Image (cartoon, coloured by chain):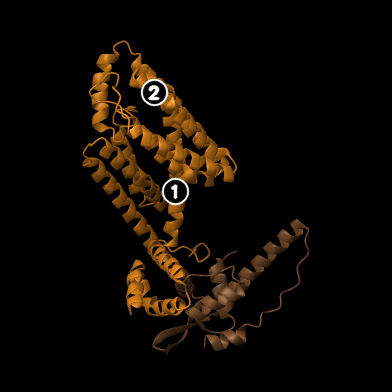
């Protein structure tokens, strides 16, 4: 009886209409099957039941969209990781002042860059090792950086630089980039080129700011404007004023576009989830209240999920393409 | 293949006669020589889709030891779909064999499992 109650509870992962049609016979079949299974096999069966339940609710079309979106988001994450690693590698000393004497951050960024390019271009087995190497390096560097005191910042000493934040962000980006390998070679080459170009562009921008004739005056106003808005606060890289609003606005537009093309909503969802995780992590590390950041993320996620749900209800894919 | 592996095996099993969920699970495992071992959740999603598309239908229902058993049978459309899939797989295999330069292996004798399954899962 306990087993039956447990199975009926797990069956709730399926949609009500599916349960109406199959719950009784499925529970009976599962009970029959369980009598021949080991506890480990039963646990595996339970996990699989729930997985299939959610897949059934989402619909095969949505699952396909999400798989495609994960590949796109993964490339995006890796590109961002490459760009940030280049900036951090080449301008860390200038940006954070003379207090940083250890060579380890440079070693970390070189390892991160090597890992990113390895993920993209090495043969499959080696690319997995490159991914693992990058993630392990990032985690170790993050643990070490967390124990260090914050560094004073040029132009605004009242807001010190935290190395652990930037290590965390790049590590998360590289970890998410693990699925980029499943895209085509031209897409990977394009992503690497874009990432490198963005990195070089950011380096030039940072240089221009640091060496402007009245950099002190420019910096104070610039930093205020950027800091009030920049959601990730990536080592105070200050990508651009209004970057946070721009990012949320773009994702919101992408989620809304999901009403017409479900893949857009899937991409918005796969992007907003890691961004939210990084936001929560960085805000928590710096004890900054989340408020609007989190609300904006939730709004984007809710719209994307609604669009995906609408897409899976309205689209009846052909028998041939649907996979269990 | 123009249908997925699990649907292929469900339709194949049902060509021999009506079968219920647990019987399908067991027979697919035997016929596929262990290469396809569907879980219950995935199997019923397949059954649900095949039923919705009109490739299988409910044949009968009975209660054995207090447990509901619903038997499914293949429809004419389902049989047609399976024939289409078999032809496609055969063509693909022939092309691959030709490219590999290998000969067609001996046809595998139909395993004599049906009678025993018939008694085991009746």
Where does residue B41 sit, x and y in percent of width and height? 44, 70
Examine the image and state in which quarter residue B99 appears.
bottom right
Q: Residues within 10 Å of mark 2 (few under 14, many from 20)?
A: some
Q: Position of residue A23 (x, y in %)?
A: 37, 76
Under circle 2, the secondary element is helix
Measured as percent of width and height from the top left, residue A308 is found at 36, 55
| Mark 2 or mark 1, earlier in chain | 1
Hey, which residue is sitting farthest top in the picture? Answer: A213
Between the C-alphas of marks 2 and 1, the distance is 31 Å
Secondary element under disc 1, as helix, strand or loop, is: helix
Tell me what residue is drawn at x 35 percent, y 69 percent.
A10
Q: In the rendered view, would you say B49 is above or below A291? A: below
Q: Nearer the viewer, mark 2 or mark 1?
A: 2
Q: Which chain comes out orange in the rendered image? A: A
Q: Colour of chain B?
A: brown
Q: Is residue B79 visible?
A: no
Residue position for label 1: A70
Q: Mark 1 and mark 2 in contact (Cβ < 8 Å)?
A: no
Residue B120 position within the rendered picture, expressed as x and y whole percent measured from the top left: 54, 86
Q: Judge whether A282 appears above or below B53 on screen.
A: above
Q: Which mark is residue A92?
A: 2
């Amino acid at each position: 009886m306990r087993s039956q109650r447990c199975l009926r509870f797990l069956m709730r992962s399926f949609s009500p209409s599916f349960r109406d049609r199959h719950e009784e016979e499925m529970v009976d079949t599962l009970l029959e099957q369980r009598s021949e299974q080991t506890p480990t096999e039963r646990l595996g069966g339970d996990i699989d039941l729930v997985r299939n339940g959610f897949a059934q609710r989402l619909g095969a079309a949505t699952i396909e969209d999400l798989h495609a979106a994960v590949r796109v988001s993964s490339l995006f994450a890796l590109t961002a990781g490459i760009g940030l690693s280049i900036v951090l590698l080449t301008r860390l000393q200038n940006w954070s002042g003379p207090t940083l004497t250890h060579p380890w951050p440079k070693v970390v960024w070189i390892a991160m860059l090597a890992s990113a390019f390895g993920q993209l271009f090495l043969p499959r087995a080696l690319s997995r090792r490159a991914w693992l190497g990058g993630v392990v390096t990032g985690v170790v560097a993050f643990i070490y950086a967390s124990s260090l005191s914050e560094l004073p910042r040029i132009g605004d000493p009242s807001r010190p630089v935290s190395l652990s934040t930037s290590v965390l962000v790049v590590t998360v980006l590289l970890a998410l980039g693990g699925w980029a390998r499943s895209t085509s070679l031209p897409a990977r080459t394009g992503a690497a080129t874009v990432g490198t170009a963005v990195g070089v562009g950011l380096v030039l921008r940072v240089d221009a700011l640091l060496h402007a004739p009245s950099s002190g005056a420019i910096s104070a106003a610039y930093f205020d404007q950027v800091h009030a808005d920049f959601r990730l606060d990536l080592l105070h890289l200050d990508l651009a004023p209004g970057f946070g609003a721009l990012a949320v606005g773009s994702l919101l537009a992408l989620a809304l576009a999901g009403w017409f093309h479900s893949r857009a909503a899937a991409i918005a969802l796969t992007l907003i989830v890691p961004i939210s995780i990084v936001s929560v992590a960085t805000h928590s590390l710096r004890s900054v209240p989340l408020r609007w950041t989190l609300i904006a993320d939730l709004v984007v996620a809710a719209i994307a999920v609604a669009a995906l749900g609408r897409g899976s209800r309205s689209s009846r894919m052909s028998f041939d393409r649907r996979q269990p | 293949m123009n249908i997925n592996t699990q649907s292929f095996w469900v339709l194949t099993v049902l060509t021999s006669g009506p079968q219920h969920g647990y019987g399908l699970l067991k027979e697919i495992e035997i016929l596929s020589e262990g290469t396809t071992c569907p879980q219950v959740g995935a199997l019923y999603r397949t059954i649900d889709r095949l039923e919705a598309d009109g490739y299988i239908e409910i044949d009968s229902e009975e209660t054995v030891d207090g447990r509901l058993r619903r038997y499914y049978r293949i429809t004419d459309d389902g049989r047609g779909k399976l024939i289409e899939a078999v032809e496609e797989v055969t063509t693909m295999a022939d092309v691959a064999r030709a490219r590999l330069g290998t000969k067609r292996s001996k046809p595998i004798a139909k395993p004599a499992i049906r009678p025993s399954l018939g008694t085991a899962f009746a």
